[in-house]
Amino acid sequence: MSKKTLTLMSKDKQLFNIEEHLAVQSVTIRNMVKEDGASSVIPLPRVDSETLALVIEYLNRQQAPEEDEDYVKKFVDERGEIPTLLELAQAALDLDIKKLMDAACMKVADLIKDFTLEEVREALRIENDRTPEEEKAIRDEFQWAF
């Protein structure tokens, strides 16, 4: 008896095959399978191929819906670069894989906890849209935070 596989398509049109029992650990994919049987390709328009490959690696290595906290933490720790972790967290959010999303976010928080405001903005790609005067007023009002 062969296991049923699903085909996932990333936003950059790469196709990935994954066993259905692993893919449905994602609530988003599970709901798609329930709604239309997912007989063809399941598009994931917000997840790029590099990140989808990581999510599939996570799901394949996990091998069970009951996610082990140590495994999730180790998997995320192996991807220590902030841009990769942010993409992984976003994909986990989009695919509704809660423990993976939580672990990726916690890792990012841990990595940036000692950063300056400017370093946080750079790491998280946040543009400073305040004028120098507004910035000074905020720094003066909340000196304790800086």
Image: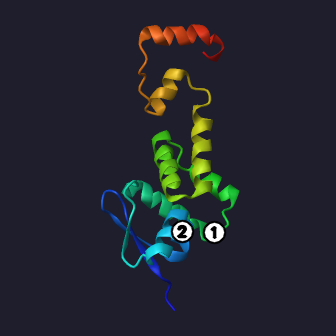
- Please give left or right for residue 14 compared with residue 135 in the image: left
Is 40 drawn above or below residue 115 in the view shown? below
Q: Position of residue 50 (x, y in %)?
A: 40, 55
**Secondary structure beneath disc 1?**
loop
Residue 77 appears in the picture as rendered: no
Quadrant where the C terminus is found in the figure: top right
Q: Position of residue 20 (x, y in %)?
A: 50, 76
Q: Nearer the viewer, residue 107 or 132?
A: 132
| CA neighbours of label 1 inside 10 A, class few (<14), some (14 to 19), many (20+) | few
Q: Amino acid at mark 1?
A: Pro
Q: Amino acid at mark 2?
A: Asn
Comes first in the chain, label 1 or label 2: 2
Count of picture labels = 2
**Secondary structure beneath disc 2?**
helix
Residue 57 appears in the picture as rendered: yes
Q: Which residue ends up furthest to the bottom in the rendered image?
A: 1
Q: What residue is disc 2 on?
A: 60
Locate residue 115: give its quadrant.
top right
Q: Nearer the viewer, residue 104 or 33?
A: 33
Q: What residue is disc 1 on?
A: 65
Image mark for residue 43: none
- C-alpha separation, residue under disc 1 versus residue under disc 2: 11 Å
Residue at the image point whose x is 62% and y is 11% from the top: 143
Q: Position of residue 16 (x, y in %)?
A: 39, 68
Q: Which residue ends up furthest to the left in the rendered image?
A: 13
Q: Position of residue 75 (x, y in %)?
A: 58, 55
Is 135 drawn above or below residue 99 in the view shown? above
Please state which of the two labelled residues, at mark 1 or mark 2, is closer to the viewer: 1
Is 65 drawn above or below residue 136 in the view shown? below
Residue at the image point whose x is 53% and y is 8% from the top: 137
| CA neighbours of label 2 inside 10 A, class few (<14), some (14 to 19), many (20+) | some
